[in-house]
Image (cartoon, rainbow, N blue to C red):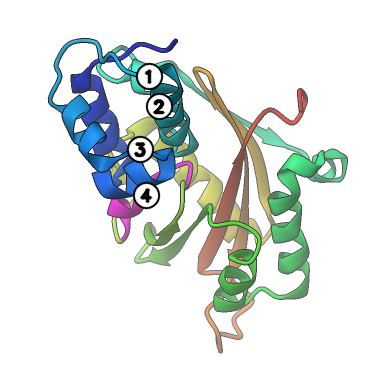
Amino acid sequence: MTKFTGKQLRAAIGFVGLSRDRLALEAGLNVRTLDRWCTIDDVIKGQTTKLSALVAALERHGCDVTEMGQPRSSLISVDLPPETLYRLPRKFGGVLSLVEIFGETRTHESVIQRIRNVTSRIASVSEIGGRIFFDYIEGDALVAGPGNRNRSVDEIDDREMGCIAAERNWKALLTGQPQLAFASRGNLQYLVLTVPTRPSGDRSPLATRTVTTSFRGNPLRV
C-alpha cells in the first residue's frame, strides 16, 4: 500500500488546485474523512481501498502524493512524429479526436466545444504581447490546475513543466501544426497533443491560441 503523511497530502491538494470537497468526490470519500487525514502529520492509516482511491484521484491530476516534499523526479519530454497518431491504441482516442477536430476547424471556440464532448482534460493558452497565458483549464490537465488560469505558462509553480509546455505551445503557434509529445515524471507518463487555433472571426493565417489535451499512459506499452 502506498504510504504518505498528512503533510504530503496537504501539499498535494495545494499542488493540484482542487478543493477538498471536489477531491473527496472524485476519490469517492467522505469529505470529513479527507479533512481528518489532512490534520495528521505522520503517516496516514486508513482502509487500503480508500487510500488507494485518493492516490489514484491525485495521480489523475498529475500529482504523486508520495513525491511531495521529496526531491522531484526529472521531467522528460520527447517530441513524437505525427505518424505516431495512427498507431495509437483506443486508450488515446481523445488525442485522435482532437486531431480530427483540428482537421475540420481551427476556430478556437469550436475546437473547445467539440473536444469537451470527448474529454474534460483540456487546457488552452493565448499569445499576448509575446508571452502565452492560460485562458482555459478544465479537468485534470497535465500542466496545471484550474488555479493557474490567467497565469503565464512559464510562471506556474512547476517551472520545469511550465517551460516545456511553453516550448510546445510556441512550436504550435509558430508552425501552425499540431505538436505531439510524450512526457514522463516518475511513475506518471502522458501522451500530450497541442493544436494551434484562432479566435472566432479572426481570418489571420497565424494562430494566436492553442488547445492541449493529455492522456495518461505510455503509447508503446498500452
User: Where residue 159 sits in the image (x, y, percent)?
Assistant: 33, 34
User: Could you tell me which secondary element the residue under label 4 belongs to?
Assistant: helix
Magenta residues span 141-149
N-terminal label among 1 and 4: 1
User: Where residue 115 sits in the image (x, y, percent)?
Assistant: 63, 64
Direction from residue 77 to residue 13 in the image, left or right: left
Marks 2, 4: nearer the viewer = 2
Q: Main secondary structure of the magenta part?
A: loop
Mark 2–mark 1 CB contact (< 8 Å)? yes
Mark 2–mark 3 CB contact (< 8 Å)? yes
Q: Which residue is situated farthest in the bottom direction here?
A: 201
In whole angstroms, how far apart are the C-alphas of marks 2 and 1? Answer: 5 Å
Tell me if I can see residue 19 in this picture. Answer: no
User: Where residue 108 sits in the image (x, y, percent)?
Assistant: 56, 73
Is 46 placed above or below 170 here? above
Asked if the stretch drawn in magenta spans residue 142, the answer is yes
Amino acid found under the numbered disc labelled 1: Gln
